[in-house]
Image (tube, rainbow, N blue to C red):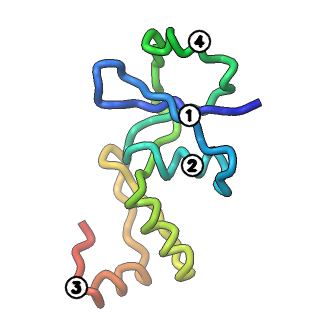
């Protein structure tokens, strides 16, 4: 059975439904992390739990603090590049507690003249 991603949106409907490509090499969790807009919460459900498409506009979801959050394509790509470089990389959302930047990552930021904010 196929799974789908239901995610928060900034529209009046409040949620969107994403149908991952069956031929994708990414897991559904990685697809959600990559494609759900940065900071938006999402859940993964079995497609059979959804109503018929003509009733999709009636779908309402109460997202909770425990639900996962998307990174969006740009942050996802940066995290994958850090992983390929052998660096530990994480991303925090604005409502989470501060975590210090690892020295190896800070050295790269400083060398490239970047800003760590």
Q: How crowded is the residue under tag 4: few (<14 C-alpha within 10 Å), some, or many (20+)?
A: few
Q: Which residue is mark 2?
A: 31
Image side of residue 87 versus residue 72, left or right:
right
Q: Which residue is mark 3?
A: 113
Marks 2 and 1 sit apart, C-alpha to C-alpha, by 9 Å
Q: Are marks 2 and 4 in contact (CB under 8 Å)?
A: no
Q: How crowded is the residue under tag 1: few (<14 C-alpha within 10 Å), some, or many (20+)?
A: many
Choose the circle earlier in sequence order: 3 or 4. Answer: 4
Residue 6 on image: x %, y %:
51, 29
Check disc 4 and report its element: helix, strand or loop: loop
Marks 2 and 4 sit apart, C-alpha to C-alpha, by 23 Å
Choose the circle earlier in sequence order: 2 or 4. Answer: 2
Q: Quadrant of the N terminus?
A: top right
Q: Are marks 2 and 1 in contact (CB under 8 Å)?
A: yes
Choose the circle earlier in sequence order: 1 or 3. Answer: 1
Could you say which disc has been placed on residue 5 in the image? 1
Look at the picture and state if 51 lies above or below 77: above
Q: How crowded is the residue under tag 3: few (<14 C-alpha within 10 Å), some, or many (20+)?
A: few
Residue 110 on image: x %, y %:
28, 86
Q: Residue at x 46, y 25 (%)?
A: 63
Check disc 2 and report its element: helix, strand or loop: helix
Q: Residue at x 66, y 25 (%)?
A: 47
Look at the picture and state if 74 lies above or below 11: below
Residue 101 placement: quadrant: bottom left
Q: Nearer the viewer, mark 1 or mark 4?
A: 4
Q: Which residue is mark 4?
A: 52
Q: Are marks 1 and 3 in contact (CB under 8 Å)?
A: no
Q: Are marks 3 and 4 in contact (CB under 8 Å)?
A: no
* Closer to us: 2 or 91: 2
* Closer to us: 1 or 62: 1
């Amino acid at each position: 059975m196929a799974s789908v991603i239901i995610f928060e949106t900034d529209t009046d409907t409040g949620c969107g439904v994403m149908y991952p490509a069956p031929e994708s090499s990414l897991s559904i969790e990685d697809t959600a992390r990559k494609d759900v807009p940065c900071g938006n919460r999402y859940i993964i459900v079995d497609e059979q739990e959804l109503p018929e498409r003509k009733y999709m506009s009636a779908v309402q979801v109460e997202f909770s603090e425990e639900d996962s959050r998307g990174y969006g394509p740009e942050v996802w790509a940066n995290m994958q590049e850090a992983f390929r470089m052998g660096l530990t990389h994480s991303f925090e959302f604005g409502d989470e507690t501060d975590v210090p930047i690892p020295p190896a990552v800070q050295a790269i930021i400083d060398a490239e003249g970047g800003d760590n904010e």
